[in-house]
Amino acid sequence: MKYDPSNSIKVPIDTLMVGMFVTAIEDSKRVNLANAGRVSSQQAIQQLVKNGIKFAWVDQSLSAKGSVFKPVVEEEPPEEDVSATPVKRKSMSRFSKQKKASKIIREAKGLAQKILNQTFDDKSIHVDDLEGWADDLIEAVLIDSDALHCVSALRSKDEYLLEHSVNVATLLVTFGKHLELPKDTLKQLAIGGIIHDVGKIKVDDKVLHKPGKLTPEEFDHMKLHQVFAEEIIFTVDGLGDISRDVCLMHHEKLDGNGYPKGLKGDEIPLHGRMSCIVDIYDALTADRCYKKGMSSAEAFKIILSLTPFHLDRDLVYKFINCIGVYPVGALVELNDGRVGIVWTSNADEPLKPEVKCFYSRKYKRFVDVSFVDIKNSQYKIEKAIAPCNLEVDPTPFFDV
C-alpha cells in the first residue's frame, strides 16, 4: 500500500489504537518503517510500549474508520524579553534540514537549466540571479552539510549535466568550509561550480551524449567546451575571479598537460586545483550514458593515482578528509550483511559514521529500518557499495 510519510501525524503511544496505519515510530528520533501498515492487535501496541517507543506516526487516511486521533501538541517556548536575552537560532531537525536541502537542490537545478537555456539563446548570464541561491547553499553547508549531501546523492543519468553542476558547487562549498576559507570565497566557489560546465551547451549533442568512448577527434571537439566557456563567462558582468578560476581551470593539470591553457604548477591557484579534484570525483561517482558510477572508495583510489602530476596530493588528502572515506549519502555494507546509507558523518572518527540500514544481503530481503552508530556499535563497515552493484533500489530510504 502506497503512503506518504509527510502526511502522517504524531500521536502518543498510549493513544494508539488497533486499525491505525503506522508509518513511523519514535523513541528519541523518528524512524520510518519499511513495512508500514495497520496495527493488528493490542499486543502489538503493548510490545511497542515495552520497547520504549514513546510516539507513533499514523496516516489518518489509511487508518480504520472510527480511529480517534490525539496529535501531540508541541509546546511553544515562553516569550522572552528580546532586549535582554541574546537571540539563539532554533536547532533544526534532520527532517527540516533535509526538506530545506531538497528545496535548495531543486532551485539549483532550475537555475542550472536557466543558465544553459540563456547560453543556448546567446543571452547573458546574470550573477544577481545566482547570489541568493549561493547564500542559501552556504548557510545549509555551514549549519549541517549531512542533509544536503544525502539529498544530492540521489541522481539520474538523464540529468547528469544539471546534477553535476549542482554537486560540484555543493562539494566546493563543503571543501572550502573545511579549508576555513572566508564566506565571500565560498560564495564565489558556489557560483563558479554551478556554471563551470556552461560551455558544454555549445558542444555537439552526439558527442556530449555518446554512449561510448570518444574518438580522438570527438575528444578534441569535447575539449572545446572550455573555449566556449571562456567566450561566455567573459561577457558576464560581476563574475568574481574565483568563479572564473573554477570555470576555466577544472581541466588543467599540474604537469601542464591539461586544457585549455596548459597551465602548470603555481599557475593554477588554489581554487582551480580544488575544482579539478571535485570535478573528477563527482564525474567518477555518477552514472553516465556510457558507464555506471563507482563507489566513493573506488573514486578516491583513482584520484590518488593522479597525484602528484595531475592533482595536488596534499589537497586530495584534505578533500578525502573533508567528505570522509564513507561520505554521507554513500551506500555501505556492514559485517553482518546489512546494507545502509551513510546518514551522519563523524568528524572525530571518519571511519565510524552513523548508518541507516534497510536491507540484508545475507537474507536477500528488506529489513526494518534501523540506525547504527558505528562508533558505539559492535558492527563495522565491511565495504562501500556503488548503487549500480546493489540488487535493490535504495532511493525510498533516502527520505527521513
Image (cartoon, helix red, strand yellow):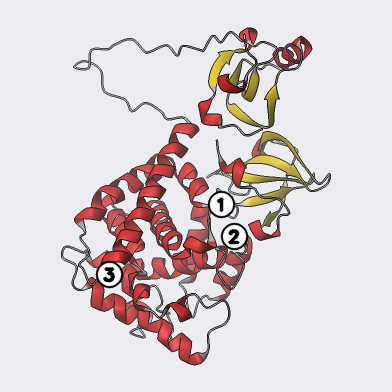
Q: In the image, which disc is placed on residue 327? A: 1
Q: Which residue is mark 3?
A: 119
Q: Residue furthest bottom?
A: 217
Q: Residue at x 40, y 67 (%)?
A: 275
- The answer for how far apart the CA atoms under marks 1 and 2 are is 7 Å
According to the image, label 2 marks what residue?
Answer: 296
Numbered disc in front, either 3 or 1: 3
Foreground label between 2 and 3: 3
Q: Position of residue 221 (x, y in %)?
A: 41, 86
Q: Residue furthest left?
A: 237
Instruction: Give, as a three-letter code, the residue at label 1.
Output: Pro
Above-or-below relation of 3 to 358: above
Secondary structure state at the residue bearing disc 1: loop
- Residue positioned 71% across, 50% down in the render: 392
Residue 154 % position (x, y): 53, 51
- How crowded is the residue under tag 2: few (<14 C-alpha within 10 Å), some, or many (20+)? many
Residue 150 horizontal side relative to residue 397, left or right: left
Crowd band around label 1 with a 10 angstrom C-alpha radius: few (<14), some (14–19), many (20+): many
Q: Is residue 263 left or right of residue 131?
A: right
Indicate which disc, 3 or 1, sits on the residue closer to the N terminus: 3
Residue name at image x 30 percent, y 49 percent: 133
Residue 290 can be seen in this image: yes
> Which amino acid lies under the numbered mark 2 shown in the image of this protein?
Ser
- Decide which of 49, 20 is in the foreground and name it: 20
Q: Are marks 3 and 1 in contact (CB under 8 Å)?
A: no
Looking at the rendering, in which quadrant would you find the N terminus? Answer: top right
Q: Are marks 1 and 2 in contact (CB under 8 Å)?
A: yes
